Amino acid sequence: MKQFDLPPLWLACFAVVAWWQAQVLSLGLTLAHPVTSLIAGLLIGAGMVLTLLAAMEFRRARTTIIPHREPAQLITSGIFSKTRNPIYLADVLILAGLCLWFDAVLSLVLVPVLAVILERRFIVPEENRLRRLFRADFARYAEKTGRWV
């Protein structure tokens, strides 16, 4: 089952729920405005840029980007010098942007729910693995770099 327990699948499921909610269960609530569309685009774009920057660092380090696998090395450069979890942060930003883009006001509650799921299912186990593998290096890294920002 772990091969299906991937953050992009969680994001996709939450995005589908948000789209459905906007189409079927809007209850007349709306945030539709050109500024909202701009913010949505910026959030989605920022999430895509974060994902790309993180993927480039994984490639440079020649280590796995796939959760639940053991990394070959600790990445602390590039975007990882600003956040320990740029891809998970990107997922949250993208979902927030999609909720705004779809005008899925009620689904905005899914954004913190996704953040909690990502933290419990992926971040904490990954950080425990990194802590075990890279002991002092990870401790120093975690001390100076925030989990989210």
Image: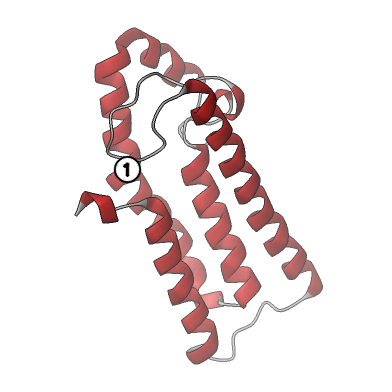
Which residue is found at the position 57% from the left and 70% from the top?
99
Mark 1: amino acid: Phe
Image spot of residue 27 (x, y percent): 53, 91
Quadrant where the C terminus sits is top right
Q: Residue furthest left?
A: 1
Q: Position of residue 146 (x, y in %)?
A: 49, 29
Q: How is the image coloured?
A: secondary structure
CA neighbours of label 1 inside 10 A, class few (<14), some (14 to 19), many (20+): some
Residue at 66 percent of width and 48 percent of height: 46
- Residue placed at 27% from the left, 39% from the top? 68
For residue 73, what is the image quadrant? top left
| Left or right relative to 30: residue 113 | left
Taking the image as shown, residue 32 lies to the left or right of residue 148, namely right
Q: Residue at x 46, y 74 (%)?
A: 16
Q: Position of residue 118 (x, y in %)?
A: 37, 49
> Where does the N terminus fall, quadrant-wise?
bottom left
Which image quarter: residue 71? top left
Q: Residue furthest right?
A: 34
- Give the image location of residue 131, x and y in percent: 29, 20
Q: Nearer the viewer, residue 35 or 94?
A: 94
State left or right for residue 48 relative to residue 137: right
Q: Is residue 147 above or below residue 22?
A: above
SS category of the residue bearing label 1: helix
Measured along the vertical axis of the image, is residue 44 above or below residue 82? below
User: Disc 1 designates what residue?
Assistant: 122
In the current view of this chain or complex, which residue is farthest to the top?
136
Task: Tell me how many marks there are.
Answer: 1
